Image: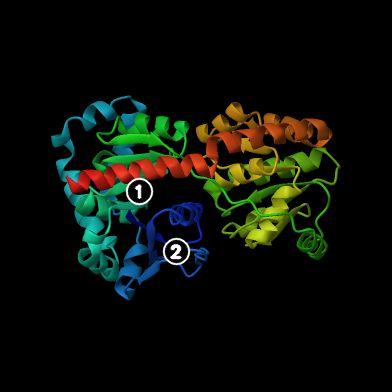
């Protein structure tokens, strides 16, 4: 079987997800990684056997920086209101209502969010060589264009969160047009069905595994000393944006104003909110390599994920894999479900439950150990690569066989 992942090179969790899955699948099939260069801050593509990069033209790069046009924003607000009123799924069945918004949005996508010319040309020339294409994100322009032209070969990993872009017409269209949909969690599937209804394609919950590195005490001790890291800390890994960090900074500062302990909050990732972290107990580490990240996770009191927009959360699975408990935002159904199903973490809904969770974690090493062990069992049973690769081989084989008929 010959397949292609079609994604971008931006340094995000979605790219990391695509890269890890591609590495595993290339062990049993012919895998290409066709990458659109959207960002100078590239994700690490090391280990992929076949990578083809497609740069945007200067004209296309300018287009990508543009925000939604007015009519798209209006439609998003209308669709969100209909969702809140419980009418969206009903009105989506009346296709004629959305003819004009869909036409306007398609025109906008083709003009403002095109595929790179090189990628488009490559697909036209090499399409017959591939049995399936794997794309990530139902709000991605890549998914939109691929499903418009190659829907019979596309397997969509939708990465659905409850956020504004899910109410763009194209996000609904991508979900409905996909013949094969691979969700990461049951909670994500439920969120998608609440917004978009049941799809016409085959739906599976597959997920993604993670890569755990062996301990490296030498690297850890040197990094710990260099950054003045204490023995007790909470760890956040990821992009520092308002959606991703939520109320974590204000909650932690409030907590430290009440408790005079040595607990630190370490932040590892690209920072877009520089004014948020002016505090002596919040340590910003910047972007760290995989070895350092692995050591930071391994030695943490807990890994924090305060995001309310997650479809899987690789960092939660990475923590569970090495028996480290997690502290997560319970307003995100996916994160809450991880804690409830595993017993490997604590979720909070407000400051009071955040404070209670932190105090439980730092006061009871025995409880942390028990939670860590439960999380590790959950990660191995639900997200082991053997189980995931088997599911992917099955769905790819089915796509390939359909196209041969």
Q: What percent of the width, then of the height, locates residue 70?
A: 28, 51
Numbered circle sitting on residue 139: 1
**Foreground tag (1 vs 2):** 2
- The answer to whether 285 appears left or right of 245 in the picture is right
The reply to whether residue 158 is in sight is no
Q: Which mark is residue 90?
A: none
Residue at horizontal 31%, vertical 45%? 397
Q: Quadrant of the C terminus?
A: top left
Q: Which residue is mark 2?
A: 9
Q: CA distance from mark 1 to mark 2?
A: 16 Å
Query: Depth check: 309 or 22 in front?
Result: 22
Q: Secondary structure at mark 2?
A: loop
Crowding at label 2, few (<14), some or many (≥20) Cα neighbours within 10 Å?
many
Residue 159 position by quadrant? top left
Above or below, 402 relative to 371:
below
Q: Vertical placement of 228 versus 333: above or below? A: below
Up-down relation of residue 152 to residue 198 (above or below): below
Between residue 168 and residue 37, name the one nearer to us.
Answer: 37
Decide which of tag 1 and tag 2 comes sooner along the chain.
2
Secondary structure state at the residue bearing disc 1: loop
Toward the front, the furthest residue is: 28
Question: Which sits in the foreground, 319 or 308?
Answer: 319
- Quadrant of res 92: top left
Image coordinates of residue 22 in percent, x first then y, are: 44, 55
């Amino acid at each position: 079987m010959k397949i292609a992942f079609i994604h971008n090179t931006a340094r995000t969790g979605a790219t990391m997800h695509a890269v890890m899955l591609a590495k595993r699948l290339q062990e049993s099939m012919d895998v290409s990684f066709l990458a659109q260069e959207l960002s100078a801050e590239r994700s690490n593509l090391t280990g992929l056997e076949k990578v083809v990069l497609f740069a945007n033209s200067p004209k296309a790069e300018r287009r990508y920086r543009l925000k939604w046009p007015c009519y798209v924003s209006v439609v998003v607000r209308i669709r969100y209101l209909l969702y809140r009123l419980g009418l969206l799924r009903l009105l989506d069945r009346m296709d004629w209502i959305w003819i004009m918004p869909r036409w306007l949005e398609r025109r906008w996508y083709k003009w403002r969010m095109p595929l790179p010319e090189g990628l488009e040309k490559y697909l036209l020339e090499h399409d017959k060589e591939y049995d399936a294409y794997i794309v990530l994100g139902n709000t991605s322009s890549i998914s939109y264009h691929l499903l418009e032209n190659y829907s019979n070969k596309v397997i969509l990993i939708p990465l659905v969160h409850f956020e504004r872009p899910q109410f763009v017409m194209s996000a609904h269209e991508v979900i409905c047009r996909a013949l094969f949909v691979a969700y990461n969690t049951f909670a994500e599937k439920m969120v998608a069905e609440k917004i978009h209804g049941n799809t016409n394609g085959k739906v599976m919950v597959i997920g993604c595994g993670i890569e755990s590195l062996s301990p490296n005490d030498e690297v850890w001790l040197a990094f710990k000393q260099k950054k003045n890291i204490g023995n007790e800390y909470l760890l956040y890994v990821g992009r520092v944006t308002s959606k991703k960090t939520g109320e974590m900074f204000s909650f932690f500062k409030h907590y430290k104003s009440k408790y005079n302990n040595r607990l630190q909050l370490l932040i590892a990732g690209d920072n877009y909110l520089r004014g948020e972290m002016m505090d002596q107990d919040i340590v910003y580490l910047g972007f760290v390599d995989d070895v350092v990240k692995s050591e930071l996770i391994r030695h943490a009191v807990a890994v924090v994920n305060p995001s309310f927009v997650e479809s899987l959360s690789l960092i939660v699975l990475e923590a569970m894999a090495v028996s480290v408990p997690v502290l997560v935002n319970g307003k995100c159904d996916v994160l809450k479900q991880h804690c409830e199903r595993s017993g490997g973490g604590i979720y909070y809904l407000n400051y009071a439950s955040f404070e209670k969770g932190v105090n439980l974690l730092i006061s009871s090493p025995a409880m942390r150990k028990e939670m860590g062990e439960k999380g590790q069992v959950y990660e191995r049973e639900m997200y082991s690569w053997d189980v995931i690769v088997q599911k992917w081989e099955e769905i790819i084989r089915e796509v390939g066989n359909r196209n041969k008929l």
